[in-house]
Image (tube, rainbow, N blue to C red):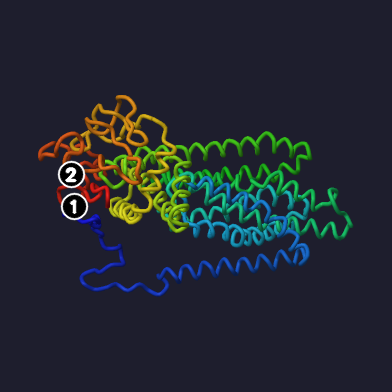
Amino acid sequence: MSSPFPPSPPQPPHPGGGPEGGVLRHAHWWQHRWVRYGALITLLALSGLVILALVREQTGTEGLLVGLGLAVLPVPLLVAAFRWLDRVEPGPWRNLLFAFAWGACAAALIAIIANSFATRWIATATADPSGADTLGATVIAPVVEESAKAAAVLLVFLFRRRDFTGIVDGVVIAGITATGFAFTENILYLGTAFGTDQLTGDSGIASVTAATFFVRVVMSPFAHPLFTVLTGIGFGVAALSGERQHTRRVLLPLSGLLLAMGMHALWNGSSSFGELGFLAVYAAIMVPAFGLLTWLVVWTRQRELRTVREELPAYAAAGWITPAEPFALGSMRARRLARVHAGRHLGRPAARVVAQYEAYATSLAFLRHRGRQGRAGADFLVREGELLNELWRRKDVARPALDHAARMTAPPVRMPPPPWPAYGAYGYGQGQTYGPQGQAYGPGQGYGQGPAYGLSPAYGPSPTYGPSPTYGGRPHAPGDGHRNGHTPGYGYGYEPGHLPGYGYPPGPHPSADPHQ
């Protein structure tokens, strides 16, 4: 009698942290995670307090409050936009909080100190304060500010590598960092403008505060995120590169940073072209660039969904997920319906479980995609086992919700061709494709040689599918040659119902029982 739980994949000792020769190696106190987190939080908090004091000194308490109230208006919209882009494989909130705090506190403090020092030094050296201000705005500020913001992207890229897997991750981290930076900068500019109006007595539409608000918050709230996103794209493409492509992984982020500096310098310098020159740069460069980058990230998001639909059927064939899940997980509408269905019937905790299941399944699809392309790390099997176990723990709640979403959203479509070779028990022959409620839609590529697999009207998998000794149209027999039909190191197709390297005994996988 098979166990309802899959055996845990073998876990190698943690590098430098596990037993070695029977003796535990104790980490130094500064190597503990809570020490590093505490130091980082302390650094950001001190930077925030210093920024608050500097802005208050320049704008006054009333100007600080007015600037704060106006500068916060675009922040929720920008954060929501970047979070929407990250919905396919949402990163942890701690990364976003770090990015925003770094931009608003550390990067802003670096920019204020460095820009002021450089501008004063140039003014003293050249005896031309006006020229020093222009040079500082068009040359010094873009270099300092973009470098300070890029540091947050670099830190996440280096120390949160599992959460940084592609272009969308780079765009989101860079955009959130720049949103925090723009928030602090807008407080300073709007507070200073309000102080000027207090001295001149201007108010209403004709005030400096209104003009500053219109230019910085209404016309160009995306300016700073647009610049820094170029850096994020460079890091994102570098994340897609192989670990041995060291030159590519260094040059791509640097190229993105240089582009960000160049566009930032052009934007700052447009104010010296006069009102018509500023509008020309805005209409001819900023708006098209924003549209192009928006198209790029949306296209990348759609490509990620396609990767989910193409990679997860391998795990459906092995019995880890149901055949309908690749389609449901590859549709944002189906994902949302699954969460809503779980929340409506089982409560909000169940909706969170479904969201976690979706995130783990997406990470699994991306991991397998990198493995097939030869870009997976040495911990591929360990990471794969971790993700599969996380899915298995949540299957009882997530599967019925995803099956419901598949039935509600899946049209009668042909299953995408599998990207793996057709060998052994996982061979694909001419059969019928499957659709919602077990209905077959015409002859075409399907699983096995018989009728198509589908979902029964009841929630959960129907008894007609799942791994069994006869899955794939015929019993598995030794010597089929399917051991040589998989991608080296990342392939599937040993025994029906399990994956190589996990030590499962021959026979049906636990998930073959539809009531488990």
Where residue 3 sits, quadrant-wise, is bottom left
| Left or right position of 203 against 54 | right
Between 387 and 262, which is closer to the camera in this rendering?
387
Identity of the residue furthest to the right in this view: 201
Name the disc covering residue 294, or none. none
Residue at 61% of width from left, 51% of height from top? Answer: 143
Task: Tell me if 276 is positioned left or right of 383 in this view.
Answer: right
Residue type at mark 1 is Tyr
Residue 378 visible in the shown view:
no
Q: Which residue is mark 2?
A: 495
Q: At which x and y percent is residue 74?
A: 66, 51
In the rendered view of the protein, which quadrant contains the N terminus?
bottom left
User: How many residues crowd around disc 2 within 10 Å: few (fewer than 14), some, or many (20 or more)?
Assistant: many
Looking at the rendered structure, the secondary structure element under dot 1 is loop
Residue at the left extreme, as displayed = 478
Q: Give the answer, above or below, for where 186 lies relative to 439.
A: below
Residue 150: x %, y % from top left: 54, 53
* Residue at the outermost top position: 443
Q: Give 424 or 322, whichever is nearer the viewer.
A: 322
Amino acid type, residue under disc 2 in the picture: Glu
Horizontal and vertical percent position of residue 211: 79, 48
Nearest the eye: 293 or 271: 293
Q: Within 10 Å of the Cα at label 1, are there few (<14), some (14-19), or many (20+) other Cα atoms?
A: some
In the image shown, does 358 or 341 lie closer to the viewer? 341
Sequence-wise first label, 1 or 2: 2
Q: Residue at left 65%, top 68%?
A: 50
Of helix, strand and loop, which one carries label 2? loop
Q: Are marks 1 and 2 in contact (CB under 8 Å)?
A: yes
Residue on which disc 1 sits: 504
Q: Is residue 395 left or right of residue 36?
A: left
Looking at the picture, how far across and down is residue 102, in whole percent?
57, 60
